[in-house]
Amino acid sequence: MDTTTIPASSLRSWRDPITLLFLVMAFDILFWERALGLDLLVFIALVLVVLVAKTGWNGLSRTARMTMGGALLAGIMVVVHHSSLAMAVAILALVVSSAAAQEARLRSLFYSLLHASTNILMTPFVALGRLDRLPNVNGVPRTGWRWVKLVALPLLLLLLFTQLYRAGNPKFDHLTAGFMDGLWEFLSDALSNIFTAHTFFLLFGLLACAGSIFRFAPRMVIEMEDQWQDVLVRTRRRLPQWASPRSMDGLERERRMGVILLVLVNLLLVVVNAIDVQWLWFGFEVPVDFSLKQFVHEGTWMLIISILLSMVILMYFFRNNMNFYARSRSLRTLALLWVGQNLVLGISVFLRNYQYIAFHGLAYKRIGVIVFLGLVLVGLVTLYFKVRDKKSLFYLARVNGWAMFTVLIALTTVDWDSAIVRFNLGHWNRGEIDVDNYLAMSDKVLPLLYADLDKVEGQMARHRSNTVRWVEHLDPQTFRMELDVKRDLFEQRVAQQHWQEWNLADQRTANALHPMSDPK
């Protein structure tokens, strides 16, 4: 009989360490001293393949499958558009999808992130404890690790007490000074060679890879989420026979207070919405000497805060027993009316931002306001269903969390830099376009700017005739010089680019710039 044959059970036990080692090596090859690009997509694909192989496609929950698809799509968008947003969202989606793959019962974005965070924190502690479970092939790995634990702890404690005794006894310090100083110098040199920046990077990669494919998080997180349901269920508390029935006076006072408040704020909001509908919705024109910036910057956020405050107030009133109180019908009707009026107010806020874009052009903050406002409107719709159908706060958090996740994934599919520059270059109001922002955009917009330098110069000329000049770049020659510097830096970066950093956006930009480059 061949005693060197490794049992099949031992091979299965080694599968996880070998998979982890492979992922860490891939992590190091892909990311060490490299910018994000193709490498992020490759790593996401590797992690997803490992997760599917471990669990099986049929063993994955719908949440896991959807978030995996989102992670893969965002990773593809990193290669296609190479935007910071796509990179951040791809990493977020990978974290969420790994948590959903490890725990099929997860239902919400918040608890998925909490599970992933707990899993990462627990990884080093649980992993050290599991080293004793390594397969025993001819007795070597398990016995070796036990000897390491047996020797390392006494030596560390010996060094600790030696230093304590040296500090407390001068003669002992003098006696051991030569040996201990030499030992510390040796250890310092050894550790400086071992614990390099690359070592810490590998340790980070080990932590990230292990946390992505293995479950170390306790059951506490999923047990916390299991306590929450989408629909509120009334739980009756039976009192002892000798106890008098509880009074409904407190609930009735709260209902009356809510009815008074909602009647007043509904009347107030009717006036505000009537003004906005008449003023903004049909044929709005910017009045003379009217501050559109104040109208949008301050007014928009004040109205958004009012909508959010309205949502908080309604969640307070319909938090517990008011959902089941027999006399709460009037309060519920007023609440639904307030939600509907806030939806109208949200449309008015969107029109404010639209008018601002129509007058001043596109910018990231203006797009951000639209996205945030869209999520607020989704929140209002879910709040409507919460009040009408006795839904729980968990329902609000779950649905709105996944709405935000979906919107973030969708945002990665657009090349926002190019969209902003194209829109602003063709804008009718040339004297209100932020020319300085062109140079702050990513390198993807370089071909657009070179192709339409005449439009940029026209916008600068219009700015020079403004009474108030709020942009720095008013000289076309200076702008062209800075644009050339930006182009040269881009070409140097692409020339030094490794395959891990490759992305389609840089490739398209380089191809478009090549005919435009000045002859050397």
Image (spheres, rainbow, N blue to C red):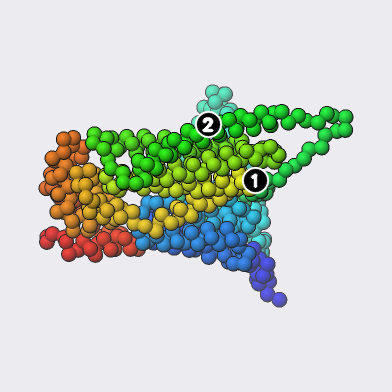
Instruction: Judge whether residue 220 can be spotted in this image.
Output: no
Q: Give the SS element for disc 1.
A: loop
Q: Circle 2 is placed at which residue position?
A: 264
The residue located at (33%, 36%) in the rendering is 295
Question: Marks 2 and 1: in contact by CB < 8 Å?
Answer: no
Q: Quadrant of residue 346?
A: top left
Left or right side of 208 for 436? left
Q: Quadrant of residue 394?
A: top right
Q: Three-letter amino acid code at disc 1?
A: Lys
**Quick one: which residue is furthest to the bottom in this view?**
1
The residue located at (24%, 65%) in the rendering is 511
Instruction: Judge whether residue 8 can be spotted in this image.
Output: yes
Q: Circle 1 is placed at which residue position?
A: 390
**Horizontal and vertical percent position of residue 50:** 55, 63
Q: Three-letter amino acid code at disc 2?
A: Leu
Instruction: Return the disc, 1 or 2, that comes first in the chain's sequence.
Output: 2
Left or right side of 2 for 211? left
